[in-house]
Amino acid sequence: MATRVHWFLPTAGDGRDVVGFGAAARRRAATPQYLGQVAQAAEDLGFAGVLTPTGTWCEDAWLTTAGLVPVTNTLQFLVAFRPGFVSPTLAAQMAATFQRQSGGRLLLNIVTGGDAEEQHRFGDWLDHDERYDRTDEFLTVLRGAWGERPFDFTGRHYMVEGATVLERPDPIPTIYFGGASDAAQRVAARHVNVYLIWGETPTAAAEQIGKVAALAAEHGRSIRFGIRLHVIARDTSNAAWAEADRLLDAMDPALITAAQERLRQSESVGQQRMAALHGGSRDALEISPNLWAGYGLVRSGAGTALVGSHDEIADRIAEYHELGFDEFILSGQPHLEEAYWFGEGVIPRLRERGLVDQFSSRSVAAPA
């Protein structure tokens, strides 16, 4: 099976540095014009879709991607949203509308949330495991509303009667989902099509795949696996690592300290795993061949990047694919330029190896 390679929409703004806050964080505003450039470049270069994040500091993913539908043709939009903030029946309706208006280009990324401060900002006071219990029910109702007949459900968090939509989405959106905790992985095993992890070493990533695949098998299901990584691809390995060094040099030690203190407050098990890769130290950041943990010094979420020549990056993607990863969600600073570095340098090499087909941005229907 060929891989599907996605890019990222920088809806919190873009820049030439990794630092996620401060003066360097928003050198380019997330205007419709700039995001349109990124989306069009991703489509032209052969990316299957683009992930749009969710949270306080970025533009709304639903509205932003809906605005980009008319300026693209085949690109899919992986819309991230938090299930506790809208009703599952409304989300089913929104998704069905999006599929009709876009010609079937919606993918859904369910983000349960691991930052209590962020959750409180939106009025959500459930604890970590309760949030995943709610996500479990949410996905049950969401899929039920897309069914052939009105759906009734009574649970701890939701009670619906006759949940349905005007017309079933075609195709049913592929559901992506991440979370490294036991509670998250149980939800993934029951409901999702693609389980996502943030970029870890091949050994650690293989362990995650094995655990979730086994849980899914207990429910008679098989799911696909995806990995979220930044990327620095250049014509030579030396040039790529020089760019990584430049990004590292721009990280003020005081900002690293402040960021690490903030990230330690996170309830996310995945965030804890990212922090363990570097321990807050600028030393020994290449934790596996061509896998650099520098992003995680100052940013939450995905904290690692593939760094190297185009051939080296293709080698690493092939290595992860052999472990069982079929979907790769990539990004880089700035997102427009880095899309071209990867799209012109690495995607052709992946095609030569049969790892990405020529029509990677065509819609793929998801199994139930």
Image (tube, rainbow, N blue to C red):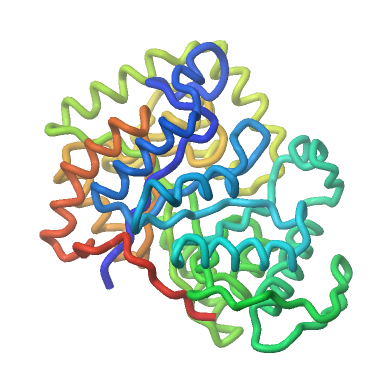
In front here: 230 or 41? Answer: 41
Residue closest to the eye, 142 or 36: 36
Quarter of the image where the C terminus is located: bottom right
Provide residue 335's location: percent of width, then percent of height: 36, 33
Asked if residue 352 lies left or right of residue 321, the reply is left
Left or right placement of residue 311 versus residue 135 in this view? left
- Please provide percent x and percent y for residue 142: 69, 71
Left or right side of 360 for 315: left
Residue found 55% across the figure and 61% down from its top: 98
Q: Quadrant of residue 181?
A: bottom right
Q: Is residue 209 left or right of residue 340?
A: right
Whether residue 144 is visible, yes or no, is: yes
Above-or-below relation of 157 to 51 = below
Residue 200 visible in the snapshot? no
Q: Is residue 274 above or below residue 250?
A: below
Residue 104 x, y percent position in the rendering: 46, 67
The residue under the point 76% across, 56% down is 86
Quadrant in the picture for residue 131: bottom right
Where is residue 162, by image quadrant? bottom right
Residue at 38%, 46% (x, y): give it: 71
* Quarter that holds the N terminus: bottom left
Q: For this rendering, which residue is in front, 341 or 310?
A: 341
